[in-house]
Image (cartoon, helix red, strand yellow):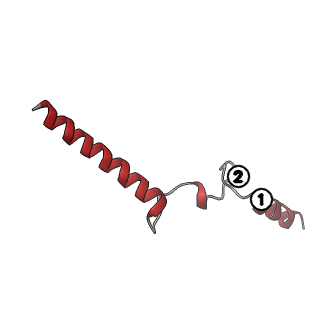
């Protein structure tokens, strides 16, 4: 009985991890994360884009 519960928990755990990995890296419709953000606070925000936007504001 306990061995069966262990297998069920393991299968559910690996399925959830597999789903998250698939959704993050392999899915065409990626999960919402920082790739598309326009906040300066985002660590993945393109610095060149920030500089361009600042230069356009000054002009």
The location of residue 19, given as percent across then percent down, is 36, 54
14 w.r.t. 2: above or below: below
The location of residue 11, given as percent across then percent down, is 25, 45
The location of residue 44, given as percent across then percent down, is 66, 53
- Number of residue marks: 2
Front residue of this view, candidates 12 and 39: 12
Between the C-alphas of marks 1 and 2, the distance is 8 Å
Answer few, some or many: residues within 10 Å of disc 1's Cα (few below 14, many 20 plus, some between 14 and 19). some
- Asked if residue 31 lies left or right of residue 3, the reply is right
Residue beneath the point at 77% across and 56% down:
47
Mark 1 or 2, nearer chain start = 2
> What residue would you read off at disc 1?
50
The quadrant of the picture occupied by the N terminus is top left
Which residue ends up furthest to the left in the rendered image?
1
Front residue of this view, candidates 56 and 33: 33
Q: Secondary structure at mark 2?
A: loop
Answer few, some or many: residues within 10 Å of disc 2's Cα (few below 14, many 20 plus, some between 14 and 19). few
Residue beneath the point at 54% across and 55% down:
33
Q: Secondary structure at mark 1?
A: helix
- Asked if residue 47 lies left or right of residue 41, the reply is right
Q: Quadrant of residue 50?
A: bottom right
> What residue would you read off at disc 2?
40
Q: Quadrant of residue 10?
A: top left
The quadrant of the picture occupied by the C terminus is bottom right
Instruction: Tell me, yes or no, whether the two marked residues, 1 and 2, touch with CB atoms within 8 Å.
Output: yes
Which residue ends up furthest to the top in the rendered image?
2
């Amino acid at each position: 009985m306990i061995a069966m519960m262990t297998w069920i928990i393991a299968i559910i755990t690996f399925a959830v991890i597999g789903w998250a990995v698939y959704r993050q890296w392999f899915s065409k419709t990626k999960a919402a994360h920082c790739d598309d953000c326009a906040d300066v606070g985002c660590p993945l925000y393109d610095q060149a884009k920030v500089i361009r936007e600042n230069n356009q504001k000054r002009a």
